[in-house]
Structures are given as structure tokens and as C-alpha cells.
Image (tube, rainbow, N blue to C red):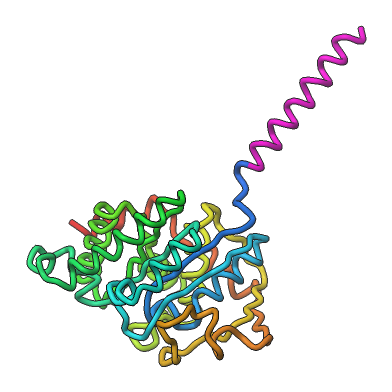
Amino acid sequence: MRRPALLSAALFALSLAASSARAQDAAPPKAYRVMLVGNSLTYTNNLPALLRAVGASQGVRIDTETWAAPGGTLAERMQDGHVTASLQARPVDVAVMQEQGGKLAACMASAQEQRKAPCAASLRAYEQVAAAVAKSQGKTLLFATWGPDERWQGRLDRSIRMIAKESGGSVFNAAGALAALREAQPGINVLPDATHPSIQGSLMLALALYRDITGHAPVAKDLRVTAPLLPVNAAVSPDSPMEAQPGLAGDGKVTVIPASLLAPLVAALPDPAKQAEAEGRRGR
């Protein structure tokens, strides 16, 4: 009589161990090293700081290194050598690449623009970073920017998909995240100056970016932001990471963003599959 009981107990223990292993597999790692490269679309409201705060609220450490400049292009950030040198010295888990908006971001959607030097330099920058990140088994997220109307958005979407195919990176649909927020809360002015996101827009981007980095949707919890929420005209230098620049790194002051403000944003996060389907319709 004892042998079946012992066998049953052993099988139960093995089942618990297997369940625990599956739960551990499903949980995101406790730390990520993330490099962000871009311009004012990245540093307005300090998207890197918001991303770090979202991670901390979920019990996931996210260390960021941000190379940005007002109006800057990816080619400029590669030409100054800092991004390449940093990737060689310290591998990253994720690189987020945000190109200058407008014609350059949409250039791959036009055969004529593709042949021009700025477009070729932009694609080369994406490819160089993606190749460097892949060496350390990391991934590159291509920041899909937004346009003024559906027609232009279609060009931007086609361009970023072509860049993803050429570079091996994955699309971070920033435009789709803002569109989902606008649809869920029509009263919100997501782009106060028609170009740069509001604080709620940047929070939506941080939540969506956390999901794309970790593979897990965040839960709405209070955020403790320890760096300033930067304005569009912030004095950001391309010569060092934002996180190391005086006035940008923070002075110990904490801004608390309550979970009640984040809850509707988390609820509005678009389903990735439906988002991809919508992109496909716009890109035809």
C-alpha cells in the first residue's frame, strides 16, 4: 500500500517542478540592457526614463543608454562613432532605432528616394546596428514613426517593413500604439505640436516598448520616474549618452505617475496580430 502512495507523491512533486519550470520560462528576465538611438521623438518626455520606470514597476530592471540629438539622423549617430564604439564595448539585449521623421523615414517606399544617398545611409545605419546586436544574440527594434494622414502613414509603414526585411530587425509600431490610444481616448491630444508626443503619448510608447522588449504586457502600477520629463527643445548633446549628461540624468527628484493614469493606456495597448493586419491594409 505504501508503494503506490510514494509513487503518487513523487509524480505530484515532478508535476509541481514542471509547472514551476514553465512559469519561470514564461517570466521575463530580471534585467535588460537597452540602447536607444534617435532624436526628439525619443527624448521628448524622456522615453528612456519612462521605460526604466515601467520596468521597475514590473520588477524588471532595464538599463538604458541613449544616443540622441535634436533633428538627428541615424546616419549621423553612426558617423560620430559613439554608437559603434559602445556596442563593441558593451553588448546590448535590445537596440531601438528611431529615424528622423518625414521623407527620410518613408524613403524606402519610393524607388526614386531609395537611390538617393540619405536613404542609402539610413538603411546602412539600421543594418550596421542590427548586425552588431545580433552578434550578442540581441534584437533590434525599428521605431515606426507617425505621419499626418493615412496616405503618408501607409508610406511610412511600407518603408519600415522593407527596412526590417533588409536589416533583420523587428518593427516597434510606435505609430500604431499612439493610434490605439487616440482611438481609445478621443479626447486626448496625443501630438500637441502635430509632431511630438504628449506625456500620455510617451507613456503609451513606454508601455508598448516594454511589451516588445520583454514579450509581456505590463500591469498598471505606479511609476517612479527619477529623471526629468524633457521638453522638445531640451539641450541634448550627441557626444555622450543622455543618461550621463548633467541636467538630463536627474537630481534625485522623483515624479510619481499613478497607476490610475496608466490603466486606460494599458487597456488600449493594441493586439500585435491585429496591428500587423492593419499595417498590411494601409501598406497596399
The vertical placement of 91 against 6, above or below, is below
Q: Please identify the residue farthest to the right as the structure is shown.
A: 2
Residue 221 image-quadrant placement: bottom right
The vertical placement of 235 against 277, above or below, is below
Q: Where is residue 22 in the image (x, y as percent from the top left)?
A: 64, 37
Front residue (pair 90, 262) = 90
Residue 38 image-quadrant placement: bottom left
Q: Is residue 164 magenta?
A: no
Q: Position of residue 180 (x, y in %)?
A: 41, 66
Quarter of the image for the N terminus: give it: top right
Q: Where is residue 79 in the image (x, y as percent from the top left)?
A: 30, 74
Quarter of the image for the C terminus: give it: bottom left
Residue 49 image-quadrant placement: bottom right
Q: Please identify the residue farthest to the left as the structure is shown.
A: 112
Residues in magenta, as a range: 1-24
Is residue 232 visible in the rendered structure shown here? Answer: yes
Q: Position of residue 21 (x, y in %)?
A: 67, 36
Q: Which residue is drawn at 22% across and 60% down?
A: 158
- Using residue 166 as the reference point, say whether residue 54 is left or right of it: right
What secondary structure prevails in the magenta region? helix
Front residue (pair 208, 78) = 78
Q: Which residue is drawn at 40% across and 70% down?
A: 83
- Using residue 41 as the reference point, say whether residue 119 is left or right of it: left
- How many numbered discs, if any? 0
Is residue 208 visible in the rendered structure shown here? Answer: no
Q: Is residue 23 magenta?
A: yes
- Using residue 124 as the reference point, say whether residue 209 is left or right of it: right
